[in-house]
Amino acid sequence: MPDRLIENEGRVLRVNGQRFHAVWLADNAPSSQRTPALAAPLNNIRLLTANLVGDSVALTFAPDSTPLSFSLKWLKDHAYDTPKERSEGHMPAGSTPWGSTIKAAMPTAPFPTLKAYEATQLSWLDAIRSYGLAKVTETAGPVHEIIEIFTPAECAVTSNGNDSRAPELSLEIITCAKDEEESTVHLSDGFACAIRLKNEDPEGFAALAHHSASFVFADQTGRPFTARAPLVSLLPEGTIAAIHFAPQSAAPLTDVPFEQMEVYYRAYRHFSELVDSPEMQISVTLKEGEALVIENTRILRGTTDSHTAQRTFADRNSLLASLTALETTP
Amino acid sequence: MPDRLIENEGRVLRVNGQRFHAVWLADNAPSSQRTPALAAPLNNIRLLTANLVGDSVALTFAPDSTPLSFSLKWLKDHAYDTPKERSEGHMPAGSTPWGSTIKAAMPTAPFPTLKAYEATQLSWLDAIRSYGLAKVTETAGPVHEIIEIFTPAECAVTSNGNDSRAPELSLEIITCAKDEEESTVHLSDGFACAIRLKNEDPEGFAALAHHSASFVFADQTGRPFTARAPLVSLLPEGTIAAIHFAPQSAAPLTDVPFEQMEVYYRAYRHFSELVDSPEMQISVTLKEGEALVIENTRILRGTTDSHTAQRTFADRNSLLASLTALETTP
């Protein structure tokens, strides 16, 4: 009864209550089954037959009768027929918003243990994915030893080296300032502050997400660096992607229309107060031999921080790749 | 007649036909005139008086009578009262879309001239801002000599060095593959292709801009790098910000709802054909001593490119800062 699985004149397969388009199936052919005919599937591709065989579904397509087989589990894991979360301003998958109570449970690992045990690496890297930050203690060597926990030395990327991909340097490793006994930094979860703002002032949240802010600052040579990005950057699905909040580098707002300007300022001030509030902010003291890894597109420094602590940048995508590799190791 | 300039019970200043909010003016106080009272202006701040004095406007505010003066030219340059371009899918300011006819006028400079003359630097950097690419000939040294044209060596950023800002490594310097006489690359302007798609299939363009695509690839250690971003990334104002088009690394689309999937595939194929079309694509041959600088969030390699040419990444924001510094040098 192949017709039971095929709908819409061969354009759609339905298995286990989920629909899949013929063009999507052809484009996602398991690599071992790919043929030139599937390389760039046209929308006019059609399902000819569909049969359940064990825990797979066997398919043939017109116009050229290409056979393909998909596991039912793989189809279930990649289904797109169930409406997904698309509300504006939700946390990315795998991450959890936090407030000041995180201080009592700061994810921390001693460097020697982190270096020696995969289980420690797994939970420490998972904390960075979940909370956007984690601490290391008992470090003795240079900062790049911490980076090598999640980026093998041979994969290190430099701005003037050769590499097969563009690194996204949105991880920051904060260490104690030189010549000081300790450095204190004030941190809050920018994603959590954005979600609180959304709940307390939805109109204000929308103003910050739907208009670009402008930034300008001069580097040590006096060259003017500029940037243009919304304070809250969202993916099209509404997932929070990044926070751009840098009052010290704020340039005049010119992308906010006249009618929205007062709402924007109300929300900007509200957000700024959340960032510095006792409910949302923690202070972390770093002694010699301690370091903090933060995602700097999510975690915000307090607006009164002196920024004397030292900063080093690293590739967040590489950290997530190492975490995924550990998670999928049998 | 100060009342002529003040509207809406002191919340708005009107000069030369443009309106400015009291809160915006206070927040943008010229740095020499800043006072603690202006540090975090509240929406309840009000204009008390406003008087034209020469080519400036002198203001006082309630509640604390802070005096401020703005030049009329500065206000005109930063006005936000005139509706701006907000259509989905327009070019960023200062950039121009190109097709294959650019080949006859490829922006090119010999390295010795580029190094010696600011005027050559200015036009070469401006070409990169406008077209997203430019060529260098007569190079003799290592690639970082090219990068030092726009990033002074002392400002170079590495992924394990210290720096005051997170670099955005979206510039790519392409050079001839080692042990080969020349390398040929095929390039097209992803922004121009997106705008053509918008004109030829507005519904398809919207599908690519409003849903995230997924990417996965393994690096040399086998770690799975993943990414999630729309093929066409827009700022909230509709300005094209980046193109994410990497058919070799495409993962199954799961963020596109069932109802949009066929439209998405139609547009994806259309975009892919534009990228490789003779109208949009150019081929560039790089001999020894030649290099091409491209913005890799805008310029796309042909889908059949062998990728044997060598790639080095550099900081695009630093290039733009150097260009702005040259432009504003008296």
Image: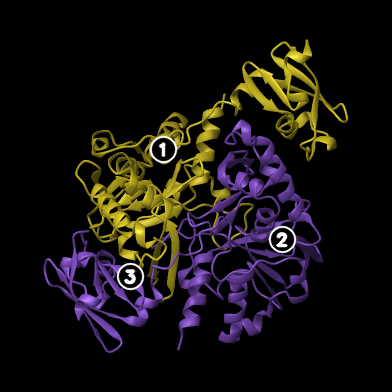
Chain colours: A yellow, B purple
| Nearer mark to the viewer, of 3 and 1 | 3
Provide the secondary structure element on which disc 1 rests.
Answer: loop
Q: Do labels 2 and 3 share a chain?
A: yes
Provide the secondary structure element on which disc 2 rests.
Answer: strand
The residue identified by callout 1 is A90
Indicate the chain on which mark 2 is placed: B
Give residue B188's mark. 2
The picture quadrant where one finds residue B266 is: top right
Position above or below: B58 against A314: below
Closer to us: B268 or B145? B268
Earlier residue among tags 2 and 3: 3
The three-letter code of the residue at mark 1 reads His
Q: Quadrant of the N terminus of chain A?
A: top right
Q: Are marks 3 and 1 on the same chain?
A: no
Callout 2: 10 Å neighbours few (<14), some, many (20+)? many
Query: What is the x, y in percent for residue A197?
Result: 30, 44
Query: What is the x, y in percent for residue B250?
Result: 66, 41
Residue at image location 64% in from the left, 69% down from the top = B131
The three-letter code of the residue at mark 3 reads Arg
